[in-house]
Structures are given as C-alpha cells and as structure tokens.
Image (tube, rainbow, N blue to C red):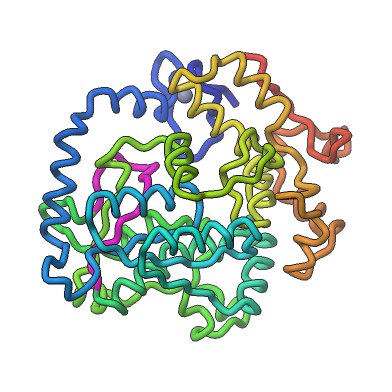
C-alpha cells in the first residue's frame, strides 16, 4: 500500500493509477482541468440542450436525478438559472434522515416538478441485509436504484435527456455528447452503476426475492431505451465541479447541513441524507484502508486549501472511525432498521477487513484500537 505523493489517496483505491513520480491519476486529472476551455464546454452544453429542450412547453426539458444532497441541490439551481424546466426524480435513500427529508422539501421549493420514488421498504431492508453480508455494502440497493429509477422515469415520462452530476471515472461528457452512439445503452449503465459483483438478476434464485419486487432495481429494456432515445450527460463535464462550492451555492438556496462534523468525516455538509452512510463508508475503510475523510482531504489538497501535512493530521484523527453513531443516531438503532444486532455486525466487519492492510495477532485475529476499528499495518506518515 502506497500513497500519492501529492494527495493522500492510496494504491488500494479501485481504478486509481500512479505516474512515475508517484502522483495519482485523480491529481493528474485535476491538473488537466486547468487546460479545459470552460467557455467552450458551456457552449457545448447549450448546443446539447438545444437538441433536447422542448421549446413548445409540451414536456420537461430534462430529468435531474436528485438525492437531496448538496450536489443535486446545486444541479437543480444551475439548470434553473440556465432557464430550463427539469423534472426532478428522487430514488429515496435506504434510511432517510430527518435533515435529508428537509433538504428534499427544499429542492421542491426551488420551483420544480418532482417525482419521489420509494421502493418497497420491506424488500429494501432485505436487500440492505443481503448487500452487507454478501458484498460488504449496506447501500447496495441504493447504489443500484439511483441509476435505475431515473432511467425508468425517463422512459415513463418520455423525457430522453438525463443530467447526472459528476463523472468521477471518465473524462467525457456522456452519451448525449457522443457523435456515434448518443443513446444510453446497457453497457454504459452497468459501467456506472456499481454492482460489486452482486447482480440484480442473481437475487431471485439465490435469495428468493421475486422479479417483480426487483423492478425498481432493473433497467428498462433496450427496446424501451431506444424508443424514448434515453441519453445522459454529466453536468461536471460542462461546468467546473467542486464539492465545497456546490455546498456554498446550495446553502445559499436553503440546503441544511448538520451543524457539526459528521462522524468519520471532517465536514458537516456531505452525506447527511442517509443514516446508513456511516456503515457504508466504514466498510470502504475496512476493504481498502481509507475512508471518507481521505477522499475529502485529498480534494482540498488538490485545490490548495490544505497542505498535505495538515491533511495527514485530519485523516489520522477522523478517517475510518468505527460507526458507533451516524448523524447522531446510535449504531444499534441504525442496525435495528435492517434487523441486525451489533455483535453480528462486528462479525461481518471482521469478515470484510483486509488483513494485508490491518494487523492481526499470531493466531490471525484482528488487533483492534480502543474505539473498535482495526489497527493499520502502515499508517500515513509518508
Ligand atoms: Zn493524488
């Protein structure tokens, strides 16, 4: 395990690569953004909107998938400022927080039509449970649903253009910008919806969940996608994207933050909508040896808002915190929602802890810190 020489991302992060000077691909991609002609990108955006917007008012101009978080609040503000009429679609989070609900209501009051789709909560709890046990991701149904449900809405309401937020994987504008194949296809969907090897189609046979109960997690057919010519773009490709400025803009438009730093994080404005997010982030730490704080600190180091050594101190004190509470809700209550107790949870944690990253004793048992998290073999003193 090694760390980027510029930010704090480790080599264990999936899909991250390093150049000969030990600088990670995320830092290099950020450097390349300085070369981007944003004026011309913004014109490209207008051109694409010109193709899809309904000037006669006969339908919405686009769909914006919104969680109610700072980024989606910013997306809505931006699209409204540019003069378009979006239909906002929310696939509700697995365990919506009180503050998350208020932020959803806030988005509606920005002045948009809004569809909130709530998958069957009984099925969803089962899927949270299965996701945590089989792939170490409590948020598996949420991560599938945030991709499938807006696409289903696009077909249902016959609004072809979906405007996603940031494209963290690829430097391209989305299928709507492509000359050759502007229609969103299944391969594109599967690439961006992180399924972690647990496929929706495996669930009926392996876990006895019926196909009809999985409709919210299933993409429309290729025929339906082609009929409506569903396509998508990433707003972050056309306008500079920065989490902090998205937050500041959102806050100016009524978005609420927690008021104190969130457990396992360094800020109070990110991931405030789902009580299960702390468990999700903790499992990322157990699997890959870095958590939410490392990601956040790294974006600030890249932008010159923190030095690397300041960042290391913050990571050491906040990253990978055992999720004994999240958004001030105790772990036992969060787990009760998915019918699991803390001791069973701890067993699952150990099962997904990467023993190449975390220390074990001579019997192969993980060594834990006082707060319950496992002890790292190599700490960040680089
Ligand atoms: Zn880096």
Q: Is 334 on the left-hand or right-hand side of 124?
A: right
Q: Residue at x 69, y 67 (%)?
A: 129
Q: Nearer the viewer, residue 359 or 343?
A: 343
Q: Residue at x 42, y 13 (%)?
A: 21
Taking the magenta stretch, the answer to whether it contains residue 160 is: yes
Whether residue 372 is in magenta: the answer is no
Relative side of 268 to 346, left or right: left
Image location of residue 148, percent across then percent down: 41, 68
Q: Is residue 342 left or right of residue 261?
A: right
Depicted 104 relative to depicted 117: above or below: above
Q: Residue at x 50, y 16 (%)?
A: 5
Q: Main secondary structure of the magenta part?
A: loop
Asked if 63 appears above or below 350 in the picture, the reply is below
The picture quadrant where one finds residue 190 is bottom left
Q: Nearer the viewer, residue 262 or 339?
A: 262
Q: Please identify the quarter of the rendering in which residue 313 is found.
A: top right
335 or 130, nearer to the observer:
335
State the extent of the magenta-drawn residues as a range.
159-174
Q: Nearer the viewer, residue 290 or 324?
A: 324
Residue 60 sits in quarter? bottom left
Quadrant where the C terminus lies? top right
Q: Quadrant of the N terminus?
A: top right
């Amino acid at each position: 395990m090694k760390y980027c020489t510029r930010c704090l991302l480790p080599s264990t992060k999936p899909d991250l690569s390093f150049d000969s000077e030990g600088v990670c691909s995320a830092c290099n991609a950020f450097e390349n953004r300085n070369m981007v002609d944003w004026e011309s990108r913004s014109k490209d955006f207008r051109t694409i909107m010109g193709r899809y917007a309904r000037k006669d008012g006969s339908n919405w101009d686009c769909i914006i998938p919104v969680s109610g978080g700072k980024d989606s609040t910013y997306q809505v503000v931006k699209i409204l400022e540019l003069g378009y009429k979006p239909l906002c679609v929310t696939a509700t989070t697995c365990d919506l927080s009180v503050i998350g609900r208020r932020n959803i209501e806030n988005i509606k009051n920005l002045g948009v039509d809004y569809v909130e789709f709530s998958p069957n909560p009984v099925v969803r709890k089962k899927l949270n449970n299965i996701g945590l046990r089989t792939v170490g991701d409590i948020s598996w149904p949420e991560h599938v649903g945030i991709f499938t449900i807006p696409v289903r809405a696009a077909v249902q309401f016959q609004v072809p253009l979906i405007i996603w937020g940031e494209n963290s994987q690829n430097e391209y504008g989305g299928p709507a910008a492509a000359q050759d194949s502007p229609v969103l296809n299944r391969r594109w969907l599967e690439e961006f919806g992180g399924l972690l090897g647990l496929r929706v189609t495996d669930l009926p046979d392996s876990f006895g969940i019926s196909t009809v109960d999985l409709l919210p997690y299933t993409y429309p057919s290729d025929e339906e996608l082609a009929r409506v010519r569903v396509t998508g773009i990433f707003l972050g490709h056309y306008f500079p994207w920065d989490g902090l400025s998205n937050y500041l803009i959102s806050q100016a438009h009524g978005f609420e933050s927690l008021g104190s730093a969130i457990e396992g994080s360094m800020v109070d404005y990110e991931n405030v909508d789902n009580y299960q997010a702390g468990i999700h982030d903790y499992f990322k730490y157990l699997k890959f040896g870095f958590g939410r704080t490392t990601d956040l600190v790294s974006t600030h180091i890249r932008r010159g808002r923190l030095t690397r050594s300041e960042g290391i101190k913050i990571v050491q004190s906040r990253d990978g915190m055992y999720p004994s509470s999240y958004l001030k809700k105790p772990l036992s209550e969060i787990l009760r929602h998915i019918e699991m107790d803390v001791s069973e949870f701890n067993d699952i944690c150990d099962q997904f802890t990467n023993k190449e990253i975390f220390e074990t004793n001579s019997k192969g048992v993980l060594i834990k810190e006082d707060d319950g998290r496992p002890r790292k073999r190599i700490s960040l003193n680089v």
